[in-house]
Amino acid sequence: MASSLALPLSDGFFRRLSKESLKEIADQIAEEKANKEAGDKSLLDFVEEELKPLSFLEAERKLPFVYGDVPKELISEPLEDLDPFYRNQMTFIAVNRKKRIYRFNATNSLYLFSPFNPVRRIAIKILIHIYPFMFC
């Protein structure tokens, strides 16, 4: 009984963004587009249309304590989005040491840099680093 009330371990929430996860998102977008064109309207589609972004997972907000601590190896790294609203959109998040959420577009930046490109990864790390914002 107690195990059913326990929250999942924090490692289960955070998944590193991979090429396979981007392919899954692209496949899901293509499937939804095909369903819309075919005119299929099921109860599940109706429920999905009502989905809205979760206010506690907005960009630049602090990660809720329910998610636990982010593993050190995943800080400032591209992660799959936690918000179900964005599951079929090409986005990913990065979390800094202060547990602030930053959301980025997963498409190629400047038509050159994928989310896995070292230049883009370094730019993300610099952007979300806490030291530039300490003096504001």
Image (cartoon, rainbow, N blue to C red):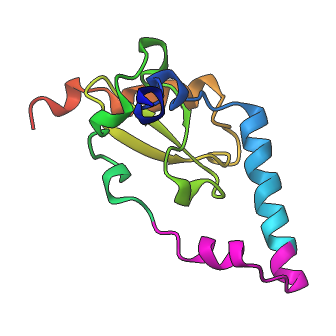
Residue 89 painted magenta: no
Q: Nearer the viewer, residue 71 or 41?
A: 41
Say if 96 sits above or below 32 in the image: above
Going 53% across and 44% down the picture, which residue do you hit? Answer: 81
Q: Nearer the viewer, residue 117 or 79?
A: 79
Q: Magenta part mainly helix, strand or loop?
A: helix
Quarter holding the N terminus is: top left
Going 70% across and 30% down the picture, which residue do you hit? Answer: 18
Residue 44 painted magenta: yes
Residue ranking furthest to the bottom: 39
Q: Is residue 68 left or right of residue 39?
A: left
Indicate the position of residue 131 as horizontal and vertical percent values. 21, 23
Indicate the position of residue 128 as horizontal and vertical percent values. 35, 32
Say if 3 sits above or below 30 in the image: above
Residue ranking furthest to the right: 38
Residue ranking furthest to the front: 1
Report how many numbered discs are placed on residues in the image. 0
Residue ranking furthest to the top: 73
Quarter holding the C terminus is: top left
Say if 93 sits above or below 48 in the image: above
Going 70% across and 72% down the picture, which residue do you hit? Answer: 44
Q: Is residue 34 left or right of residue 5?
A: right
Q: Nearer the viewer, residue 83 or 20?
A: 83
Going 77% across and 79% down the picture, which residue do you hit? Answer: 42
Q: Is residue 100 left or right of residue 22?
A: left
Indicate the position of residue 99 as horizontal and vertical percent values. 30, 31
Name the quadrant containing residue 43: bottom right
Q: Nearer the viewer, residue 97 or 45?
A: 45
Q: Which residues are magenta?
A: 35-52
